[in-house]
Image (tube, coloured by chain):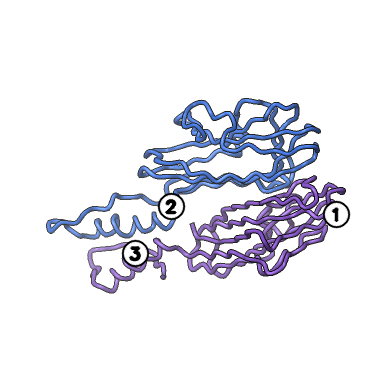
Chain colours: A purple, B blue
C-alpha cells in the first residue's frame, strides 16, 4: 500500500471517490500494515567469525527495507552465539552497519563495544542469546540495508549455530 | 517532546453531520498524520567515552540529564519502552545490575506500578569471575493504559550489593526510548 501525505482541505475541494480512496482507504491500509521486513534465518551451516576488527557476519543475516517517506525505523535482532575460546577471556562485540555508518556511533567508526557484547568467560561451547533493538529516527527516503558485524577484542572466534534461532527485522514505527 | 500532531477522537457520522473542511482536516488529515508519526521520544548516548556508576542498592536515576524521556499522551494508550546498553561490575567475584523505569510525574515504577520498585526491578543480570566482564542489557517492556497528559520517565538502576560497582559504559551505544505501541 502507498502512503500519501494527507492534504489540507479548503472550501473548494471536491470529495469524491478518488481522494477518498487515496487519502482514506489507501492511507488506512498503509497504517494498519506499515512496511517491515522480518528475516528469520535457519542457517544451513554454522557461521564462524574470527576477527579482531568488525567484519560482516554473513550476507544471509542482513536485512533491508525501502522507505517511501521520512520515518522512524526499528532495527531488531535476536541471535545466539557460542564462544570459541575460554582461555583468552574474549569479549565478542556486535554492531550494525547501515551503509557505511555504524548504528553504535552513527559515524563510519564504530564505538569500541558496538551495540552489544557477549561477555568474557562465557566458557567454551557456552551459548548466549543477544538481543538488539535500536530506534533510528528520521530515516530518509530510499533503500536501507543493515548488516550485522562482529569481532573479538581479545582474540577468539564466535560461532552462530545452525540449530539456534536467529531473527533480524526492520519496521517502520 | 512537543506534540507533532493532534489526535481527535473520530466522530460517528449521522445524517446531520456537516462534513466541511474543518471536519475533514481534523478527522481525516490530522488524525492520519498523527497515526503516521505517533508520539515518541528517544535518547541515545554515542559519546564513545565516559560512563555512569552506582553502588547504590536502592533504585536511583542513572542520569536524569541523559536518560529522561518526555511524552505527551493524547488518548489513553499503551507505551513501549526499550533500553539497550553495556554494563560491567568492578567486583572480581560477581555482580549484578538491576534496571527499572520510574514514572516520575506519577511516582511509580513500571515493575511494580507502585512507588516502590520490585526488588529486582524490570531486569537483573550480571556475570561472574571477572572485573572487566561486560554484558549487554536489553529491555523491552509495555506499560499499559497510560492516561492522557504529559509524562516523564527516568531510567533507574541499582547494584546488587555484592561488593562491586555497576558501570554503564559509553564506549557502547546506550539508547532509551518510549513510543506508543
- On the image, the x and y values in percent for residue B63 come to 62, 34
Helix, strand or loop under label 2: loop
Label 3 – label 1 distance at C-alpha? 57 Å
Q: Would you identify the image quadrant in which residue A34 lies?
A: bottom left
Dot 1: chain letter: A
Closer to viewer: mark 3 or mark 2: 2
Q: Which residue, given by chain and number where applicable, does mark 2 sit on? A: B38
Taking the image as shown, residue A155 lies to the left or right of residue B41, namely right
- On the image, the x and y values in percent for residue B41 come to 51, 46
Label 2 – label 1 distance at C-alpha? 44 Å
Single out the residue that lies furthest toward the right.
A87
Circle 3 Cα neighbour tier, 10 Å, few/some/many (<14 / 14–19 / ≥20): some
Q: Which residue, given by chain and number where applicable, does mark 3 sit on? A: A7
Name the residue nearer the viewer: A55 or B125.
B125
Circle 2 Cα neighbour tier, 10 Å, few/some/many (<14 / 14–19 / ≥20): some
Circle 1 Cα neighbour tier, 10 Å, few/some/many (<14 / 14–19 / ≥20): some
Helix, strand or loop under label 3: loop
- On the image, the x and y values in percent for residue A51 come to 82, 60
The disc at residue A155 is 1
Q: Is residue B102 above or below residue A168?
A: above
Q: How many marks?
A: 3
Name the residue nearer the viewer: A83 or B97.
A83
Amino acid at each position: 500500500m502507498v502512503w500519501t501525505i494527507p492534504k489540507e482541505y479548503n472550501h473548494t475541494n471536491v470529495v469524491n471517490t478518488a481522494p477518498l480512496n487515496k487519502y482514506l482507504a489507501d492511507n488506512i491500509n498503509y497504517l494498519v500494515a506499515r512496511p517491515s521486513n522480518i528475516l528469520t534465518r535457519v542457517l544451513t551451516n554454522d557461521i564462524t567469525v574470527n576477527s579482531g576488527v568488525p567484519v560482516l557476519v554473513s550476507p544471509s543475516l542482513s536485512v533491508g527495507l525501502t522507505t517511501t517517506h521520512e520515518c522512524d525505523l526499528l532495527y531488531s535482532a535476536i541471535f545466539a552465539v557460542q564462544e570459541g575460546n575460554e582461555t583468552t577471556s574474549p569479549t565478542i562485540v556486535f554492531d550494525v552497519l547501515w551503509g557505511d555508518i555504524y548504528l553504535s556511533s552513527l559515524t563510519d567508526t564504530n564505538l569500541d563495544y558496538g551495540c552489544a557484547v557477549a561477555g568474557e568467560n562465557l566458557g567454551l561451547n557456552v551459548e548466549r542469546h543477544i538481543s538488539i533493538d535500536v530506534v533510528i529516527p528520521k530515516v530518509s527516503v530510499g533503500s536501507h540495508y543493515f548488516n550485522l558485524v562482529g569481532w573479538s577484542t581479545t582474540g577468539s572466534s564466535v560461532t552462530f549455530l545452525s540449530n539456534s534461532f536467529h531473527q533480524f527485522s526492520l519496521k517502520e514505527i | 517532546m512537543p506534540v507533532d500532531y493532534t489526535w481527535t477522537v473520530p466522530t460517528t457520522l449521522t445524517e446531520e453531520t456537516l462534513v466541511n473542511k474543518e471536519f475533514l482536516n481534523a478527522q481525516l488529515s490530522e488524525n492520519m498524520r498523527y497515526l503516521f508519526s505517533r508520539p515518541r521520544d528517544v535518547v541515545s548516548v554515542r559519546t564513545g567515552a565516559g560512563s555512569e556508576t552506582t553502588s547504590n542498592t536502592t533504585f536511583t536515576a542513572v542520569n536524569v540529564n541523559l536518560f529522561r524521556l518526555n511524552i505527551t499522551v493524547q488518548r489513553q494508550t499503551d507505551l513501549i519502552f526499550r533500553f539497550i546498553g553495556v554494563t560491567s561490575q568492578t567486583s572480581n567475584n560477581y555482580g549484578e545490575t538491576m534496571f527499572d523505569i520510574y514514572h516520575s510525574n506519577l511516582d511509580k515504577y513500571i515493575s511494580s506500578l507502585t512507588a516502590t520498585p520490585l526488588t529486582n526491578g524490570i531486569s537483573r543480570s550480571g556475570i561472574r569471575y571477572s572485573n572487566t566482564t561486560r554484558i549487554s542489557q536489553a529491555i523491552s517492556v509495555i506499560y499499559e493504559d497510560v492516561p492522557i497528559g504529559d509524562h516523564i520517565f527516568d531510567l533507574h538502576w541499582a547494584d546488587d550489593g555484592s561488593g562491586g560497582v555497576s558501570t554503564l559504559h559509553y564506549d557502547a551505544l546506550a539508547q532509551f526510548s518510549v513510543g506508543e505501541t
